[in-house]
Image (cartoon, helix red, strand yellow):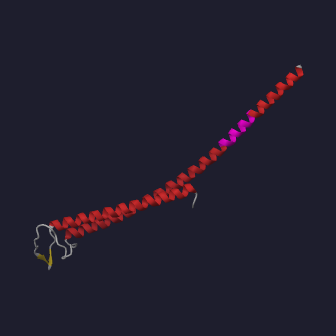
Amino acid sequence: MKQALVGILIAIGLYAYGHHKGWSERDAEMQAEIAIKNEEARAKEQELNQKLNDNEAKLLEVNNVINEKQSALDRAIRAGRVRFPSSCVQAGNVTTAAPVGGVEAASESERQTLAAIAEIVAQGDRNTEQLNACIDAYNQAREMVNGQR
């Protein structure tokens, strides 16, 4: 009976040891898998950050071009080189300016109106470019996350 009890205790001990060792091996395997997945995620994140930085640089370039065009247009408006067509009827006080070099000088209100319209157009261009950059960034991120390259 004593030998049977010792045999049972040894069997239980071996089972407990094997069970513990199996769980330890499983935990080690899981930690290795987690480390691999974390490295893959970091690599994807770095690639995505690089693409976002590239999109941001492109957007900055486009905004600089829009700002340059806006400045050139503002200078042309202030110089009187941009005018409303003579067929445009302006509401309010209609006065004729004295001709300068054969062309009527633009009134201050006309310059202000043209400058306001030019600013609205430039802001619309900036907003459109920003929206397009956002859409591009979203599509790139979606493709990376979903694995569709």
Quarter occupied by residue 14: top right
**x then y, percent, for residue 11:** 83, 29
For the C terminus, the image quarter is: bottom right
Q: Residue placed at 31% from the left, 61% from the top? A: 123
**x then y, percent, for residue 20:** 73, 33
Of 28 and 90, the residue lying toward us: 90
Quarter occupied by residue 96: bottom left
Of 138 and 105, the residue lying toward us: 138
Give the left or right position of residue 10, taking residue 136 as reference.
right
**Taking 27 as reference, is 5 above or below it?**
above
Of 149 and 63, the residue lying toward us: 149
For the N terminus, the image quarter is: top right
Q: Residue placed at 47% from the left, 58% from the top? A: 137
Total numbered circles:
0
Segment colored magenta: 20-31
Of 96 and 91, the residue lying toward us: 91
Quarter occupied by residue 30: top right
**Taking 1 as reference, is 92 above or below it?**
below
Q: Is residue 21 magenta?
A: yes
Give the left or right position of residue 82, taking residue 21 as reference.
left
Give the left or right position of residue 47, taking residue 15 as reference.
left
Q: Which residue is situated farthest in the bottom direction here?
A: 102
**x then y, percent, for residue 132:** 42, 62
Q: Residue placed at 65% from the left, 41% from the top? A: 31
Q: Residue placed at 79% from the left, 31% from the top? A: 15
Give the left or right position of residue 84, taking residue 144 as reference.
left
**Taking 147 as reference, is 86 above or below it?**
below
Q: Main secondary structure of the magenta part?
A: helix
**x then y, percent, for residue 38:** 59, 47
Q: Is residue 16 magenta?
A: no
Q: Which residue is situated farthest in the top direction here?
A: 2
